[in-house]
């Protein structure tokens, strides 16, 4: 999403490369480029000017120590100001009440219904809540069915009242049902329009007054740029919501909404949503987003995603198998499945510092493991458990069964054997220590 902004900012910092110190002259040229980069990212010109004025004030007020180059200092200052612009710290959702009532608002097409299901999934899997989804959009024909499908994917029930045309009544009945059945969170999906209008505003205001939610979240499509910021302000003037959700951050949005919505409405961005899968929802961390914008990656989020997917007990069992050189294709396939659960492969790689820029023009398919999986699944249980039995005739059969070629099967076998050797070596500290003492390795 921020690729163009990242490139432009990197070019602006190069203006300070080789400079011995920061001066009013060289910082002015750099900040002119920074301002242009922000404007190109659809940041409002007043906010862009205020931002660069703050950076200039901080930059000219600091001495550049010998160990830090002026360009590096400027990156640090811009990073801190970007984080400040976006809110500085993550703000959690209020779900202390039982049941916690969460009202979802936004324009039609912003991703409200999808977000409602994603939030339900997050509350269920990561916050130990028992959520109930409420189909409150009575106008869009497919809205109720869409929520049912998404609810099924999230493993969360959906409350509907077919034929009832009063969203306030539906919401109140849903809350009564939730209290009776012991649900700990109620997520109310509401109707949207293609543009802000008085009728929609009256309806969503009526629902809020009737159910008195603990959290009202405004969902906005990040791809609409400054329009998203303007719509967020209009909704906030009427609803006084608690937080913003930015959707479609995996699209071609220029990033202006993410950068400026916090300063315009003075409400935190609480979640960011990418993709259509119910687990594609992240808490918004301003500092981590600033890292990504400046091409620093986001290794903390990457580690967190890995921790969510990898079970400690399973990891210990795997470690024992590796130590005994018993790591097989079943284990290999299991590791691939865990990696795939973490999300889009290209997005994951971009979280590694320095990798994002290197792969931005590469076409990394989400099905990058498809060929490997097909080969492994074409093996018999015996072959997966004991790769040593894979002779020439077996490899030929596996190639035919997986729609690949014998050289591809051979290549996978070679990579697997090399990986297994390396894993065995790394698990054995004595062997590793001995290797480091070998001649020529000092």
Image (spheres, rainbow, N blue to C red):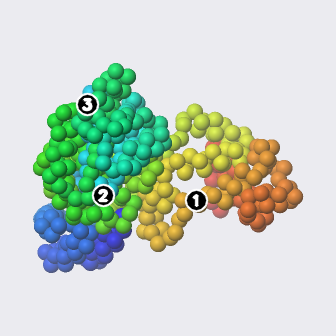
Q: Is residue 115 left or right of residue 82?
A: right
Q: Secondary structure at mark 3?
A: helix
Asked if one can make out residue 193 in the rendered structure from this viewpoint, the answer is yes
Answer with mark 2 or mark 3, whichever residue precedes in sequence.
3
Q: Nearer the viewer, residue 1 or 224?
A: 224
Q: Is residue 325 above or below residue 362?
A: above
Residue drawn at (82%, 53%) of the image? 390
Residue drawn at (33%, 68%) of the image? 6
Q: Nearer the viewer, residue 50 or 18?
A: 50
Give neighbour class at mark 1: few <14, some 14-19, many 20+ (Cα, 10 Å).
few
Residue for badge 1? 367
Residue for badge 3? 172
Numbered mark located on residue 221 in the image: 2
Q: Where does the image place residue 360, in percent across and percent down from the top left?
A: 45, 69
Residue drawn at (38%, 22%) of the image? 181
Pointer 2 and pointer 3: residues touching (CB < 8 Å)?
Answer: no
Occupied quadrant, residue 17: bottom left
Query: From this viewpoint, which residue is outermost toward the top?
Result: 180
């Amino acid at each position: 999403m921020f690729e163009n902004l990242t490139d432009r900012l990197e070019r602006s910092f190069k203006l300070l490369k080789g400079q011995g110190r920061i001066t009013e002259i060289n910082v002015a040229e750099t900040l002119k480029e920074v301002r242009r980069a922000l404007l190109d990212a659809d940041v409002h010109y007043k906010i862009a000017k205020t931002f660069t004025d703050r950076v200039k004030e901080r930059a000219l007020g600091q001495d550049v120590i010998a160990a830090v180059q002026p360009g590096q200092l400027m990156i640090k200052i811009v990073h801190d100001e970007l984080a400040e612009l976006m809110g500085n710290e993550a703000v959690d959702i209020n779900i202390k009440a039982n049941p916690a009532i969460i009202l979802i608002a936004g324009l039609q097409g912003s991703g409200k219904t999808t977000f409602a299901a994603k939030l339900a999934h997050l509350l269920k899997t990561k916050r130990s809540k028992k959520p109930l989804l409420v189909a409150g959009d009575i106008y869009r024909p497919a809205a109720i069915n869409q929520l049912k499908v998404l609810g099924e994917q999230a493993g969360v029930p959906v409350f509907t009242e077919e034929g009832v045309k009063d969203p306030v009544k539906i919401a109140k009945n849903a809350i009564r049902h939730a209290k009776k059945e012991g649900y700990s969170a109620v997520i109310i999906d509401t109707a949207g329009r293609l543009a802000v209008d008085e009728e929609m505003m009256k309806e969503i205001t009526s629902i809020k007054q009737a159910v008195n939610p603990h959290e009202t979240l405004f969902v906005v499509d990040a791809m609409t740029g400054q329009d998203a910021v303007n719509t967020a302000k209009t909704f906030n003037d009427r609803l006084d919501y608690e937080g913003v959700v930015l959707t479609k951050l995996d699209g071609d949005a220029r990033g202006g909404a993410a950068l400026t919505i916090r300063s315009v409405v003075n409400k935190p961005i609480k979640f960011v949503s990418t993709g259509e899968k119910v687990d594609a929802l992240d808490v918004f961390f301003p500092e981590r987003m600033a890292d990504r914008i400046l091409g620093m990656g986001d290794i903390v989020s990457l580690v967190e995603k890995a921790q969510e997917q990898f079970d400690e007990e399973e990891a210990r069992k795997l470690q024992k198998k590796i130590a005994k050189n018993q790591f097989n294709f079943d284990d290999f396939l299991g590791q691939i499945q865990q990696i795939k659960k973490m999300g889009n492969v290209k997005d994951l790689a971009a979280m590694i510092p320095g990798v994002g820029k290197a792969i931005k023009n590469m076409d990394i398919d989400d099905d990058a493991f498809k060929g490997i999986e097909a080969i492994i699944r074409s093996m018999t249980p015996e072959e997966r458990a004991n790769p040593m039995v894979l002779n020439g005739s077996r490899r030929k059969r596996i190639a035919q069964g997986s729609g690949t070629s014998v050289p591809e099967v051979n290549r996978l076998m070679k990579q697997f054997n090399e990986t297994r050797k390396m894993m065995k070596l790394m698990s054995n500290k004595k062997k590793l220590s001995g290797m480091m003492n070998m001649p020529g390795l000092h």
